Amino acid sequence: MASTRDIRRRIKSVKNTRQITKAMELVSASKMKKAQQAALAGRPYANLMADMLASLSTHVGETNHPFLVQRPVKTRGILLVTTDKGLCGPLNANLFKLVMEIKTPTKFYVIGRKGMQFLTRTKRDLVADFPVHDRVPFNEVRSAAELMVKHFTEGSIDTLEVIYPRYKNTLIQEAKVRPILPLPSLKDFISSASYTGGSVRVPHADDREVLFEPDISEVLNSLLPFYVNHQIYQLVLSAKASEQSARMVAMKTAKDNATSLLSELTLKYNKARQAAITQEILEIAAASFTSS
């Protein structure tokens, strides 16, 4: 049996660990709330953009736009969205499983240090990595989206996809592959990124005669790339909310485990202490009996 001194040291160590994990749980809970609010705040803007595109869809021929042209897929382009830090449960591991399942030629773009380390370690074709802070500034995400769109239009990649942890609720974050480009039609593109309480909404088309300046095609060419940027931005916001949720759950589990272990160690310490006291009483009684 371990000595009481060793058990006291373990109790002190577990208490320190529990204190740290509790503090990290509170920090993650605060960041999770902010990330959820940021993700929800972007939905009205996405809906407004969808309505604008829906108004255009009835007035423009969309077959010649590079975002809507179907072509043979020789090289996939995938944006992998991971975390910069660990301690978030199996969140990154689930994303890496999806990457490991990809056997076709693929060029990777990554947001998050963990994803960059994984792609480098597994010697995959990593084109670029982009640092994005917890507040997720739009300019940082836009640089990644614009580079991928540029390579897509130049023909370096034939698809634009995002692997990210989809935020479902506080306890569940699903690793998903979200195709962005190309899309079969402008109508499908609009419907795929319109939100109402987390579900897809279909914006109404405007069949009125409308005068566009400078012209319909120019407006569409300006809106579609910007809308793709915003759609990727929404996915990164969802990934950040998933990260903070997973970290909060992981830290809460660690804190609960530390509390349970602390109870076991306290009981073990009390037993050891009681055994030592009993042993001392027996030794005193035996010495007294021998002397008499």
Image (cartoon, helix red, strand yellow):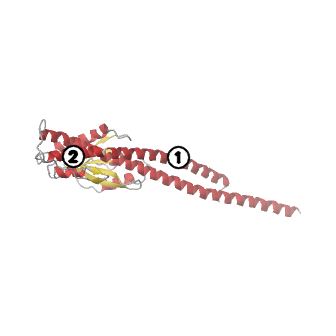
Residue at the (34%, 48%) spot, across then down: 238
When the figure is inspected, residue 205 is found, relative to residue 276, above or below; the finding is above
Task: Estimate the x, y position of residue 133 in percent, counting from the top left.
Answer: 37, 40
**What amino acid is at disc 1?**
Ile
Q: Position of residue 170 (x, y in %)?
A: 41, 53
Name which quarter of the figure residue 260 lies in. Answer: bottom right
In this rendering, would 117 be left or right of 76? right
Residue shown at the point (63%, 56%) measured from the top left: 266
Instruction: Determine crowd level at label 1: few under 14, some 14-19, many 20+ residues with C-alpha closer than 10 A.
Output: some
Residue displayed at 75% across by 61% down:
278
Task: Give x and y (percent) for residue 239.
Answer: 35, 48
Sequence-wise first label, 1 or 2: 1
Q: Residue furthest front?
A: 208
Q: Nearer the viewer, residue 47 or 94?
A: 47
Q: Is residue 66 visible?
A: no
Q: Is residue 17 left or right of residue 143?
A: right
Amino acid type of the residue that numbered disc 2 sits on in the rendered structure = Asp
Residue 234 badge: none
- Of badges 1 and 2, the one in the foreground is 2
Q: Regarding mark 2 in the picture, which secondary structure is present there?
A: helix
Does residue 37 show up? yes
**What residue is pinned by disc 1?**
20
**SS category of the residue bearing label 1:** helix
**Residues under labels 1 and 2: Cα distance?**
48 Å
Does 222 sit above or below residue 121? above
Q: Is residue 126 above or below residue 104?
A: above
Kindly identify which residue carries mark 2: 51
Residue projecting furthest to the right: 292
Residue 136: x and y in percent read: 35, 41
Nearest the viewer among 121 and 112 is 112
Looking at the rendered image, the quarter that the C terminus falls into is: bottom right
Q: Is the Cβ of the residue at disc 1 closer than 8 Å to that at disc 2?
A: no
